[in-house]
Each structure stands twice: as C-alpha cells, then as structure tokens.
Image (spheres, rainbow, N blue to C red):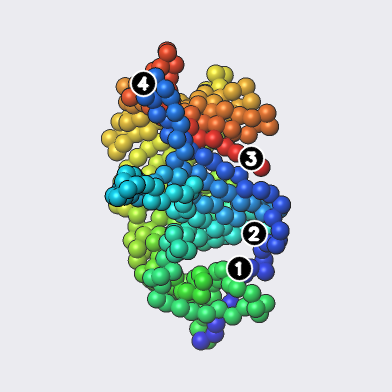
C-alpha cells in the first residue's frame, strides 16, 4: 500500500514575533445595584485580550472579581473576636483562550484552558484557497486514544495534517485527518460500479466533541453547515439566505432528523436605519424579535429584545469614543424595570478599555 502525504500545517507557516506590538484590551463587566436611592456598580468579571504586532488576537483570559462571603471572611474568637478577612484578591482567572493564526489572520487553532493550565478542549479550523472556512473540529486531548505521527521535513511542530492511502493500482482507499499527532477522523472509501471512489465509512476518535462542515456558494457566501457530535452522530444543520447586497436575511436550523427547529429572519429598513431579527419556532410561530437601531454612521446604538406580543424585554445601549470604538454598553431589564428619579437604571454595564 502506498502512503502519500498531501497536506500539513505546521508552526513554521505562522509569523509569531517574540515581542508583541499591541497592549491588551480589557472589557470589564459591572453589575448595577440600587439601594435606598443610591446606585452603585460592582465589578464582577473582566476579559483581558492580548494581540500580536499585526493586531491578531493571541490570547484572552476571563477573570472573576467576586468572592463568596464564606470564603472571604472568617470568625475569630478571643481578645480580637469578630469577622476577619480570610481571603482577598483583586481578580482570579477562571478561563483562558489561546489562539494561533496564520499570516492572513485566519484562526487555525483555539485552546481553552481552565484553572491550573488544565486543557478543556482544542479546536482546529481549515480554510479553502479563498480563505473561507470549510471545517471546524473540537476535541478533548485527555480522551484521544488513536495516536498517529506524521513526519514533517521541516522539523516543526505539526498543527494538523492529512494523509491519503492508495492501493497498488492508484485507487483511493483512505484519508486520515491528524491533529496534534492524533488521527481524529479516518474516512475509508470503496469503488462503485464505475470504479470511482465512494465513501464507505467514517471513524471518529472518542475524543472528538463535535465537527462542523461549511459550504459556500460561488460568491463566497456561507450557505450551509452541518455539525456532528460524539462518534459522528448528527447534531444539527443550518442553511443561510442572502439579499442582493450580500446581507444575510434568513437562517434555518434543522435538528438531527432534518426537521426544522428554528428560523431566524432579518429585515433591513435602510431608510430608517433599523434592522429586525425575527425568531420563530418549529410551528413557524414568532417567539421573539430583536430590533436594532443604527446611528448615522451605520453603527449599532440601541438593541431591543421583544417577545411575541412586541413587549420590550431587554434593551442594550451602545456608546462610542472619539475614535469610533465601542466604549460602553448598558444593559436594561425592562421586565424588572428599575427607575430612580425618572431615570432607568441598567442591570449591567460593560466598559471597554483600549491601551
């Protein structure tokens, strides 16, 4: 049997400078409280993002800034009886993402870390020659059971690769997809009556959490995606439609049986700087509506979530700095409407810091 190595991606393909030119950006989330007429903001979470000199995101960490009371204080008896601070910190990391990008900025690999550098999963993405995503696969390295090394003549660490197997007469028999030197997907082929290769079966390593295949039309628009889960079992699929300007107008989600699960329709009111997103269930019954108001520069500045009776449930208000970047987002809960001195009080505020 002849083995032909066709494609691989290694770290030598990436441009990763040792000194990053951009300082991290931070998004801080504050919860807003009102008590006896006084409104206060408490920092709950923050996201810290680091970029390389090209402006590509290379890592992102999520921190919590709150401590449960039973962990923060301890009761001390004796001469100094009373509550004492047991534990104090400004923040604690709960999740961290690491990203690897190619020279064009396409994201090749994402790794999610928990506390103590434990890896929850790794995710890989593949692109066609037009830089359109064609595949995404996520797996748990702790559960991978099918190691398979792929040689790389450049002696660089391999991200992912594909190897193709042929018989002695050149008939295509098998394709292996390797990620981190594990064969996560193996597709075997047989010959039909016309001696053309047809898919016989597909093997998924038990570590594979899900796999999504993407399809595009001749204009480059994403028109369909199909996702499988553990052992290749179908999870759901989606189809997309666009208007003549290339804007997405409809998304239909199907369950694993191919039945319609949800429908999302988008209507663009260009004259009034508005967009409307309609969410329908399996009975094609309107379940919720999102209305977005745009400013004169085409930027989102108010986003409202309405129920099927067009009652506003939630409202988000966007603010921008002098450079046109988002500086603040205030979230309002219109069900539990809170008003102080005839002024609405948000329940959450996101602050964007730029270095």
Looking at the image, the residue that sits furthest to the top is 342
Q: As rendered, which of 96 and 292 lies closer to the eye?
A: 96
Query: Is label 1 or label 3 in front?
Result: 3
Query: Could you tell which of marks 3 and 4 lies nearer the N-terminus?
Result: 4
Query: Is label 2 or label 3 in front?
Result: 3
Q: Do the residues labelled 2 and 1 touch (CB within 8 Å)?
A: yes
Query: Could you tell which of marks 2 and 1 lies nearer the N-terminus?
Result: 1
Whether 8 is drawn above or below 286: the answer is below
Distance from disc 4 to disc 1, alpha carbons, whole Å, reads 60 Å
Looking at the image, the residue that sits furthest to the front is 79
| Residue linked to disc 2 | 102
Distance from disc 2 to disc 3, alpha carbons, whole Å, reads 24 Å
Image point (54%, 52%), residue name:
60
Is residue 10 left or right of 214 when viewed as pictured? right
Image location (x, y in percent) of residue 198:
44, 69
Q: Are marks 4 and 2 in contact (CB under 8 Å)?
A: no
Q: How crowded is mark 2: few (under 14 residues within 10 Å), some or many (20 or more)?
A: some
| Residue linked to disc 4 | 36
Distance from disc 4 to disc 2, alpha carbons, whole Å, reads 54 Å
Image location (x, y in percent) of residue 248:
51, 37
The secondary structure type at the circle numbered 4 is loop
Residue 199 visible in rendering: no
Image point (59%, 60%), residue name:
100
| Residue linked to disc 3 | 354
| Residue linked to disc 1 | 9
Q: Are marks 2 and 3 in contact (CB under 8 Å)?
A: no
Image point (42%, 30%), residue name:
32
Query: Is label 4 or label 2 in front?
Result: 4
Distance from disc 1 to disc 3, alpha carbons, whole Å, reads 33 Å
């Amino acid at each position: 049997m002849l083995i032909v190595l066709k494609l691989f991606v290694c770290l030598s393909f990436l441009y990763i400078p040792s000194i990053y030119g951009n300082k991290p950006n931070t998004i801080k989330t504050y919860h807003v409280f009102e008590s006896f007429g006084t409104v206060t903001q408490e920092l709950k979470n923050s996201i810290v993002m680091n970029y390389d000199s090209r402006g590509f995101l290379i890592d992102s960490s999520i921190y919590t800034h709150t401590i449960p009371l039973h962990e923060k204080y301890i009761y001390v008896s004796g001469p100094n009886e009373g509550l004492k601070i047991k534990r104090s910190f400004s923040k604690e990391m709960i999740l961290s993402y690491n990203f690897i990008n190619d020279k064009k900025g396409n994201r090749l690999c994402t790794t999610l870390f928990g506390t103590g550098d434990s890896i929850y999963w790794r995710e890989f993405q593949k692109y066609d020659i037009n830089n359109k995503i064609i595949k995404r696969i996520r797996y748990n390295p702790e559960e991978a059971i099918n190691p398979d090394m792929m040689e790389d003549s450049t002696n660089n660490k391999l991200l992912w690769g594909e190897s193709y197997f042929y018989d002695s007469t050149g008939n295509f028999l098998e394709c292996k997809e390797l990620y981190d030197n594990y064969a996560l997907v193996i597709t075997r082929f047989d010959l039909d009556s016309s001696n053309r290769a047809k898919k016989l079966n597909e093997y998924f390593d038990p570590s594979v959490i899900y796999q999504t295949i993407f399809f595009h039309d001749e204009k480059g628009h994403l028109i369909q995606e199909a996702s499988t889960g553990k052992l290749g079992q179908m999870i759901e699929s989606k189809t997309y439609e666009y208007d003549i300007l290339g804007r997405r107008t409809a998304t239909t989600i199907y369950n694993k049986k191919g039945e319609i699960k949800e429908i999302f329709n988008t209507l663009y009111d260009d004259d009034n700087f508005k967009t409307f997103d309609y969410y329908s269930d399996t009975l094609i019954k309107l379940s919720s509506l999102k209305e977005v108001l745009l400013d004169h520069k085409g930027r989102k500045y108010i986003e409202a979530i309405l129920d099927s009776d067009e009652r506003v449930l939630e409202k988000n208000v966007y603010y921008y700095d002098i450079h046109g970047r988002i500086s603040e987002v205030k979230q309002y809960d219109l069900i539990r409407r809170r008003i102080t001195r005839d002024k609405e009080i948000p329940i959450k505020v996101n602050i964007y810091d730029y270095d």
